[in-house]
Image: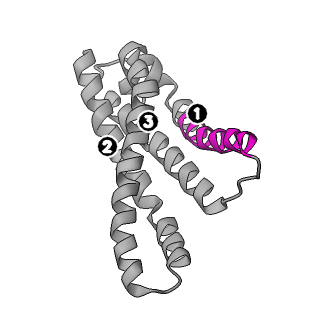
Amino acid sequence: MNRGARIRSLALAAVTGWLSGALITTPIQLVELVRNTAGDLRLMLVSLALGLILWGIWTLAIALVGVALAGLPIALWASPTWLLRHRVAIIAVSAAVGLAVPLAKFRAWDWLKPEPFYDLPLIAMYGIFASVFAAVTALLYLRMLQKKVPGGAADSLR
């Protein structure tokens, strides 16, 4: 499997991972929306549209950075057979790193601010998005590798 095919597979997996993460965090967005609009229906509808558009753009940017920093180097330089042999560990580590990065970010933010920051729904939303994005992207990328790598590890994993 050449590098171009690996990059295309990663791109497709990342788009699916981004959509999965964005959809999974939508209920948290809705809870925050209701909490912040205090029942004003007009404000709620305007905020819903704007909030979902901004969340989609923001999470897409986060996903692109994640793919550029972690996904591309792995897709370009890691052996597909090695990745397939260790696929369960790779998916688990991807989900764990996806959760750890936002938690570390908010912890570092806490150290830099004079007052503590404890917005649990916000922290949960970022953690859930990043974890789901990373795990789904890894899972789908490995599935595509499994189908495209001839013989070897791919056949033994079916």
Per the model, the C-alpha gap separating discs 3 and 2 is: 12 Å
Rendered residue at 49%/78% (across/down): 37
For the question of whether residue 158 can be seen, the reply is no
Q: Provide the secondary structure element on which disc 1 rests.
A: helix
Q: Main secondary structure of the magenta part?
A: helix
Indicate yes or no whether the magenta region holds residue 100.
yes
**Label number found at residue 15:** 2
Rendered residue at 40%/86% (across/down): 41
For the question of whether residue 87 can be seen, the reply is yes
**Mark 2 surroundings within 10 Å by alpha-carbon count, few (fewer than 14), some (14 through 19), many (20 or more):** some
Per the model, the C-alpha gap separating discs 2 and 1 is: 20 Å
Does 145 sit above or below residue 59?
Answer: above
Q: Where in the figure is residue 145, as x and y percent of width and height?
A: 33, 28
- Determine contact: label 1, label 3, CB under 8 Å: no
Q: Amino acid at mark 2?
A: Val
Query: Residue beneath label 3, please?
Result: 138
Q: For the N terminus, give its image quadrant.
A: top left
Query: Residue beneath label 1, please?
Result: 93
**Mark 3 surroundings within 10 Å by alpha-carbon count, few (fewer than 14), some (14 through 19), many (20 or more):** many
Does 153 sit above or below residue 39?
Answer: above
Q: Provide the secondary structure element on which disc 3 rests.
A: helix
Q: Where in the figure is residue 130, as x and y percent of width and height?
A: 51, 45
Q: Which label lies toward us, 3 or 2?
A: 2
- N-term mark: 2 or 1: 2
Residue nearest the observer in this picture, 117 or 148 = 117
Q: Amino acid at mark 3?
A: Ala
- N-term mark: 1 or 3: 1
Span highlighted in magenta in the image: 94-113
